[in-house]
Amino acid sequence: MNDILSLSRFGWLIRKIFIEKTASVFGSMLLCFIVTLVFYGMVMLLQGIAEAQNDAFLVGLTLGGALMASVVFGYFSNDATGVSFLTLPASVLEKWLSGILIIGLYFFLFLVYFRLIDLAFVAQYHHNLNTHSPYYKEQYELVNILRFTDSTAAQNFTMFFNFTGIMMLGALFFNKAAFIKTALVICSILVAGFLLNLFIINLLIKNVQTAFPFSIVWLWVGKERARLDLSSENADIVKIAFRFVLPAILWVLSLLRLKEKEF
């Protein structure tokens, strides 16, 4: 039998996880779906449906994916339950792939779920419009379902793969409250990165109002604001780095960390 990857052994591992961890896996998914629905409805009432679409998609996909990654890879902690999973007669790759499969399952199910609730909310919005209003056509065409191929969805997909990678690592490093501890680490890194970037930009450029790493710098020109963007070439490099290179590094590091924990 292959020591690295055996489909029969991998199938046995997946069955064991779903039998023993059904409540935590599907309970976490259900929680994420409920939060997404409630968040969509609340933001729509407060700010409108366009903002609700984007914000609910961000919360449900990115934060939900991060939570699922933390829950699933938390099975390989150093407590009694985690040790039982670490010592299963399966390869490191098979254990890692079992977690990836569940995260991928959440990704697919969330897209289906979000499409359904988005269709319902958009249909309700269109139904409630005044057909006799002179702006009916403009209002109707202003709101449509969120397309998974547009730039907003692409940015959320990038965040999903990056944050799940970070949470996978966090779950393998922290044995208790991994989600909270990793979230604090992420927040600390983001704040430190923002402040360091702003400090360096202020040393190089005068009249800086604010600056975002790898993105944009806002400058004061008299009493007006002006924006300074990355060149298209550098912007493409940053996009590739965050969409492909960084997620790949994080996911591979989680595999290496899981291998370390077995010894």
Image (cartoon, grey):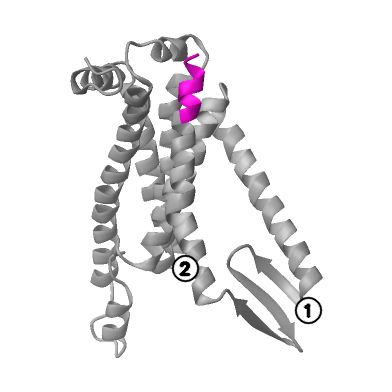
Is 27 part of what is drawn in magenta? Answer: no
* Mark with earlier residue (1, 2): 1
Assess disc 1: are there few (<14), some (14-19) or many (≥20) residues with their C-alpha within 10 Å of its C-alpha. few
User: Against 92, is 211 above or below?
Assistant: below
| Gap between marks 1 and 2 measured at Cα | 27 Å
Does any portion of residue 30 appear in the rendered image?
yes
Q: Which residue is mark 2?
A: 236
Amino acid type at circle 1 is Asn
Q: Is residue 103 left or right of residue 176?
A: left
Q: Is residue 160 left or right of residue 210?
A: left
**Where does the image place residue 233, in percent across and percent down from the top left?**
50, 73
Q: Residue at x 32, y 27 (%)?
A: 98
- Considering the image in quadrants, where does the N terminus appear? top left
**Where does the image place residue 257, in percent across and percent down from the top left?**
50, 27
Image: magenta residue range:
256-263
140 and 61: which is toward the camera:
61
